[in-house]
Image: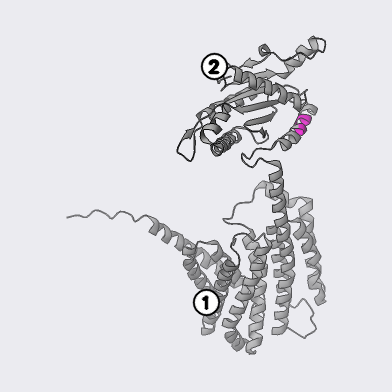
Amino acid sequence: MPTMPAAPVSGPGRDYATAASRLLLVLATTIFFASLAGILSRPNGFLAAFWPANAILAVILLRVAAPMRFPALIGGLLGYQAAGYATGDVSWGAIQLTAANMVSAVTFTFAYLSFCEEQMSIGRPRAILALVGASVLAAAAAGVAGAPILAEISHASYFDAWRTWFGSEIMSYLVLVPGLLALGWPLRRPRLADIRRLTASATLLPALAVVATLAVSVVAVEPIAIVFPVPALIWAALVLPLPATCLLVMLFSSVTMFAVKLGLYDFGTGGLSDPLISSVHLGVAMIALAPVLVAAVTADRRRQFSELEKAARFDALTGALNRGAFMAEGEAMVTAQRRAHAPMAGLLLDVDHFKRINDLHGHAAGDLALTAMAAVIRKTIRGGDLFGRLGGEEFALLLPDADLDAAALVANRICRQIERLQTPIADGTILTMTVSIGVVASVETTVELSEVLSLADRAMYEAKRAGRNQVQRCDLDAMHYDEDSDHGGNRPVSGSQLQADSGHHSV
């Protein structure tokens, strides 16, 4: 009897296996090439001048979810061993070196997670302190694990081998981890705005200063030249975003250590030695830490200032501009439109019978209704439009480059969408609501903001008197024409000068 072909296995188990296999392959390849780069930086008879593989593995272990850490460790193990085989090192010592590297990455990962709850963000001073603590522990553990084989290879004492390994590891972590964590996860393609921001003179000059001073330090003979790029790095830390600063620190450290390997610095010792390399590692690590710490503090202050500015400008409940910010930005917008002789429209919205919602369902339900309504309005308007909450259930909009018909179309669209909006509240009730909207517009923006809002307010109350849940509009230019024909008299606005949109909600 023929058998049916087995259905393809699918589900969470297969998804995990696929993701784990992909991670293992990618990480093994990454660690392989990172290890090769470190091996190429190794002076004859010494440890590598710069070993990026452990820091890369540690960052990946931080980034991936806990169930994916075991496949990541297997990938790292395969990458280390493959690099050793590719360079002809198949001895027992290569396995010991791999074990020490694994101990280093695992120690850093768990130490950092223990010290810092926000492991994904390096832009805070507390995260930098966690970075330093985890780096010290990981470097010490790696030295304990790797010193025996290093002492055997280099014919040095155990303490000298431990010190050399410790210096190399702590430099790698302090130089690489901040930059890798600051890049964010998952990685995204750079946008045009990011490129323009980085190529602006204010950000380009510090980067060029770092490159120039680094070139001078390599060309100079004296060992003191290693610190030449420090002022430029501090300048970059104060001006550039944290990821860019970390990349410049990585550039400085890599070039410096390769220059040490090539013998470009005259240390006056007659050649390289384990104590010398260890001292250079620690010196570069301390130099690298300073700009990273400055950049982290600067980024944290910028974040706090941004939060403070947001709290001062925006309504906490709805996310709209508060009254003060709306009036200030609105005045600037009206002035700009007037100078350009460009049209502008203003809308004033008020929720119908909002007091009834508060009385029947409580103020918490009213807050939910306002929040939902504000979200609908934000989705309807353009990016350059101003949206503010004037107070209570009253909101205002300013639409630059919009005539009366376009503004009325936007108002009717808002009316329709809010009428359809259903907002569930805690007791299971579904809230519905409507709004009354007054619309005014001027072809060449010949009026002040106060007049725009005043006439929009009158139009909005005319909409309420006409039955609510509708739009009333007023042509400001026609109003001024009537005033001029009346010898400049300030006649009050009458209901006949306000136009109700026909068809209830359609222009």
Relative placement, left or right, of 361 versus 462 is: left
Q: Is residue 38 above or below residue 273?
A: above
Furthest-left residue in this view: 1
Query: Mark 2 belongs to which amino acid?
Result: Gly
Q: Position of residue 67 (x, y in %)?
A: 46, 64
Residue type marked 1: Tyr
Q: Is residue 483 magenta?
A: no
Label 2 secondary element: loop
The quarter in which the C terminus is drawn is top right
- The residue pinned by badge 1 equals 85
Name the chief secondary structure element in magenta. helix
Mark linked to residue 44: none
In the image, residue 65 above or below residue 375: below
Q: Residues within 10 Å of mark 1 (few under 14, many from 20)?
A: few
Rendering quarter of residue 256:
bottom right
Task: Please tell me which of labels 2 and 1 falls first in the chain.
Answer: 1
Kindly report the distance in space between the C-alpha atoms of the residues bearing marks 2 and 1.
80 Å
The picture places residue 463, in percent across and down from the top left corner, at 61, 19
User: Which residue occupies the foreground of this view, 204 or 420?
Assistant: 420
Highlighted magenta segment, given as a residue range? 331-336
Between residues 396 and 296, which one lies in front from this camera angle? 396
Q: Let me know if residue 419 appears in the view.
A: yes
Label 2 with label 1: CB-CB less than 8 Å: no
Query: What secondary structure is marked by label 1?
Result: helix
Q: Which numbered disc covers residue 503? A: 2
Q: Residue at x 71, y 64 (%)?
A: 292
Left/right of residue 221 with respect to residue 12 in the rendered view: right
